[in-house]
Image (spheres, rainbow, N blue to C red):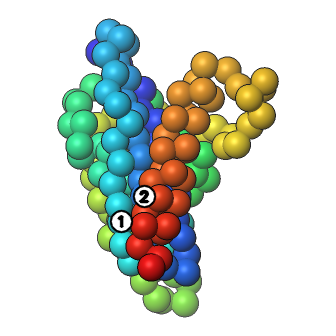
Amino acid sequence: MIVQLFIDASVNPQKRLGFGAYLSITDEGKNNDVQLKKFEDTSSTQLELETFLWAIEDIRIKTKITIYTDCQNIIRLPSRRKKLEKSNYHTKAGTPVKHSELYKKFFLLTDKYPCTFIKLKGHKKTKLKDPIDKLFTLVDKASRDALRTYILQNSI
């Protein structure tokens, strides 16, 4: 079985909160509804990582997973692994790399659950979207709508 996993997140930097969303689809045609989760005390990079980790742990499928995201940090992270591990997750100045604990968990889970990452361009015009882009739009829209609704309901 192969799983396609679409992940996206939307953050309000001033409030340091956001919503992550994912949609999983199997090659057997089974798909779930878009799943949403609120994250607090976060940033855009942190939220994308938190959303990925939550989604992988939530679906817990020990099979090949193709991850679709518009997050450049997640796409580049596997290629940065050796350098991060060699430096023990420290910068050249000797300070800990920001989000190092999330990076460690990312590598632990991607070792456990084999993942292929595919970078998507977010916010394409509708007429330019292929079927994959249309599925990604579901999580993109869900995370943005959830954040917008939450802020409107809690701004009184």
Residue displayed at 61% across by 53% down: 72
In the rendering, at what x and y percent does residue 117 appear? 51, 37
Residue 3 higher or lower than 79, as above or below: above
In the rendering, at what x and y percent does residue 141 appear? 55, 43
Q: Give the quadrant of residue 47.
A: bottom left
Q: Nearer the viewer, residue 128 or 91?
A: 128
Residue 85 numbered mark, or none: none
Callout 2 crowding tier (Cα within 10 Å): few <14, some 14–19, many ≥20: many
Amino acid type at image mark 2: Phe
Residue displayed at 53% across by 28% down: 135
Q: CA distance from mark 2 to mark 1?
A: 6 Å
**Residue 82 visible in the displayed image:** no
Circles 2, 1 touching at the beta carbon (< 8 Å)? yes
SS label for mark 1:
strand
In the rendering, at what x and y percent does residue 97 appear? 46, 78
Amino acid type at image mark 1: Phe
SS label for mark 2:
strand
Looking at the image, the residue that sits furthest to the top is 28
- The mark that comes first in sequence, 2 or 1, is 2
Callout 1 crowding tier (Cα within 10 Å): few <14, some 14–19, many ≥20: some
Residue displayed at 38% across by 36% down: 34
Residue 39 numbered mark, or none: 1
Q: Nearer the viewer, residue 25 or 112?
A: 25
Q: Nearer the viewer, residue 73 or 97?
A: 73
> Which residue position is annotated with label 2?
19
Q: Nearer the viewer, residue 125 or 145?
A: 145
Residue 125 higher or lower than 78, as above or below: above
